[in-house]
Image (tube, rainbow, N blue to C red):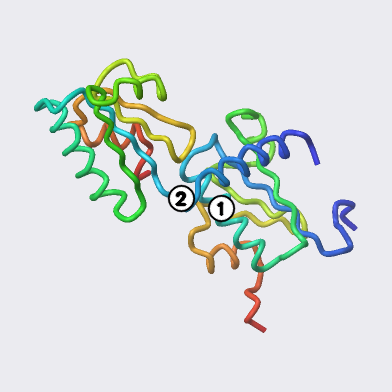
Amino acid sequence: MDDYGDESLLEFERALANRGTGDYRLRLYVSGSTPRSSKAVANVRALCERHLAGRYELEVVDLYQEPHRAKECQVIAAPTLVREQPIPTRRVIGDMSNEEKLLLSLEIAE
Amino acid sequence: MNEDFLDDGTWNLTLYVAGQTPKSMTAFANLKRICEEHLPGRYNIEIVDLMKHPELAQEHQIVAIPTLVRKVPTPMRKVIGDLSNTERALVGMSLVPRNDF
């Protein structure tokens, strides 16, 4: 069998092993409990419930409370939503009010 | 006789994808599950990523993603989609479910 088939197979095997149950793992970084932050959190929660019910994990990280966590995903603006799983990772910056754009960026509901 | 045919009845399956997306991951996961259940110990899965090797799409006549191609046993069979519908996938692969005689 040619090499290209095996190389991608390995990558997919690895990704599958990391994927767990196929759930989406999302992390939303906000800066403090401002109206903008609250709006972003509400929007993302609503989107998750509407499109990923039962198959997502959402973590909200307040960078005012835990500023050291900005570097784990190299967050430089807030709010930032990071899709950790499935890989490859994706990120979106903004108040998360455009659901359609968000779904596209996170590759949900193809 | 097709020189690719392996006497031990091993199936050679190729999954054509375009990058690692939720859909391609789902297709791969489903394919593995189906093979482990219906072809235990006698299958080979190969993944061809058309984003890395776009020239292969035309060469192997792939028009949709993901596409599963059964190369061995011949004749070739193709199944399009993420293989979530197991029954449809089995029919498409011409793999009769174990409890069907």
Type of amino acid under label 2: Gly
The spot of residue A87 in percent (x, y) is 48, 36
Q: On the picture, is B63 further left or further right than A10?
A: left
Q: CA distance from mark 2 to mark 1?
A: 9 Å
The residue drawn where x is 27% and y is 35% is: A60
Q: Nearer the viewer, residue A70 or B51?
A: A70
Type of amino acid under label 1: Ala
The residue drawn where x is 13% and y is 26% is: A36
Q: Chain of mark 1?
A: B
Q: On the picture, is A47 further left or further right than B56?
A: left
Q: Nearer the viewer, residue A52 or A30?
A: A30
Q: Residue furthest left?
A: A35
The spot of residue A29 in percent (x, y) is 28, 28
Q: Residue furthest top?
A: A76
On the image, numbered disc 1 is attached to which residue? B29
The spot of residue B10 in percent (x, y) is 80, 60
